[in-house]
Image (cartoon, rainbow, N blue to C red):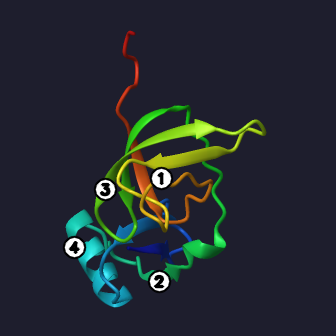
Amino acid sequence: MNYYTIFNNNPNSSDICHVVKSECDNPEYVLETWASLNGYCSPGDTYTIQKLDISEVEVPKVYPPGLYKVYWKGGGSSLAAIGMTIDGKNWIAPTNWTDDDKTLGVVTTSFNSVDYVKNLWLNRED
């Protein structure tokens, strides 16, 4: 998945910047498609597109403990428990992962391969 920032080069426009998520690796095609789908390219407006390196962006993510469906950056999904360590960091335990000897589940505090999660137990009664 790629992330792009699209800037409007017209200093008099109220339309300044957009962030676009796309599977396409061609920035010019992403810009052209985005502009045509959203009805942009008004007279006087020109746009510049820049690919974001999201590996340089550190976004803190803290999830409340619970049961989640986890969607992976590499594709696919898993059912997982997400909990908290004593210092407030999250841990994640996907139900379909095992360690090297294939007998125990994997628990990690790394969320680098997570695209997004969906809480499956939000606002439920016991």
Q: Secondary structure at mark 3?
A: strand
Q: Which circle's residue, 1 or 3, is located before the other in the chain?
A: 3
The location of residue 21, given as percent across then percent down, is 38, 68
How far apart, in angstroms, are the residues tagged by discs 2 and 1? 49 Å
Residue identifier under label 2: 48
Q: Nearer the viewer, mark 1 or mark 3?
A: 1
- Is 10 positioned to the left or the right of 39 in the image? right
Q: Secondary structure at mark 4?
A: helix
Badge 1 crowding class, 10 Å Cα cut-off, few under 14, some 14 to 19, many 20 or more, is few
Tag 4 near tag 1, CB within 8 Å:
no
- Work out whether residue 31 or residue 41 is closer to the camera in this orientation and state it: 31
The location of residue 112, given as percent across then percent down, is 55, 65
Q: Secondary structure at mark 1?
A: loop
Q: Nearer the viewer, mark 2 or mark 3?
A: 3
- Work out whether residue 64 or residue 60 is closer to the camera in this orientation and state it: 64
Tag 4 near tag 2, CB within 8 Å:
no
- Is 87 positioned to the left or the right of 113 in the image? right
Viewport quadrant of the N terminus: bottom left
Please, what is the three-letter code of the amino acid marked with disc 1? Leu
Q: Residue at x 42, y 53 (%)?
A: 116
How far apart, in angstroms, are the residues tagged by discs 4 and 2? 15 Å
The image's mark for residue 104 is 1
The location of residue 123, given as percent across then percent down, is 40, 18
Q: Which circle's residue, 4 or 1, is located before the other in the chain?
A: 4
Q: Which circle's residue, 2 or 3, is located before the other in the chain?
A: 2
Q: Which circle's residue, 4 or 3, is located before the other in the chain?
A: 4
Q: Residue at x 45, y 72 (%)?
A: 3
Residue identifier under label 4: 36
The location of residue 24, given as percent across then percent down, is 30, 82
